[in-house]
Image (cartoon, rainbow, N blue to C red):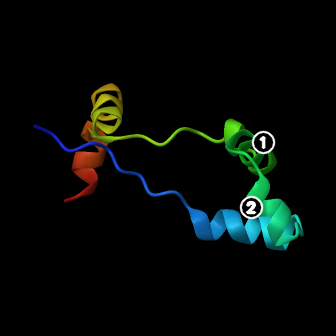
Amino acid sequence: MTEPDRTLFPWASVIRFGLGRLRLPPDQFWRLSVPELSALTGAAEAPTLTNRQGLEALMALFPDTRSAKDKTDDR
């Protein structure tokens, strides 16, 4: 049995952005819904985080191989 992917939410960054950058009063910040918060932070535009399976898929698509020239440069 595998453990579920448990990505922590970046609370410190989000709070810093909401209170510091956007200058929202705390009561308004904490009343934001998740979709509102995502829209304000631009999270929809951000790339999605990957898990182990995603990493393995990328490694299969783009393997670390060395060309013949790279091998001769090590001498």
Residue at 85% x, 61% y is: 28
Judging depth in this view, the residue of 5 and 69 nearest the camera is 5
The residue sitting at 27% across, 34% down in the picture is: 56
**Which residue is label 1 attached to?**
39
Name the image quarter holding residue 61: top left
What secondary structure is marked by label 2?
helix
**Mark 2 surroundings within 10 Å by alpha-carbon count, few (fewer than 14), some (14 through 19), many (20 or more):** few
Task: Examine the rendered structure and indicate whether residue 21 appears above or below residue 33.
Answer: below
Q: Position of residue 67 (x, y in %)?
A: 28, 37
Q: CA distance from mark 2 to mark 1?
A: 15 Å
Residue 34 percent coordinates (x, y): 68, 44
Type of amino acid at the residue the image marks with label 1: Ala
Q: Toward which corner of the image does residue 15 lie, by quadrant?
A: bottom right
The secondary structure type at the circle numbered 1 is: helix
Q: How many numbered discs?
A: 2
Please determine whether, in this image, residue 57 is positioned above or below residue 1: above
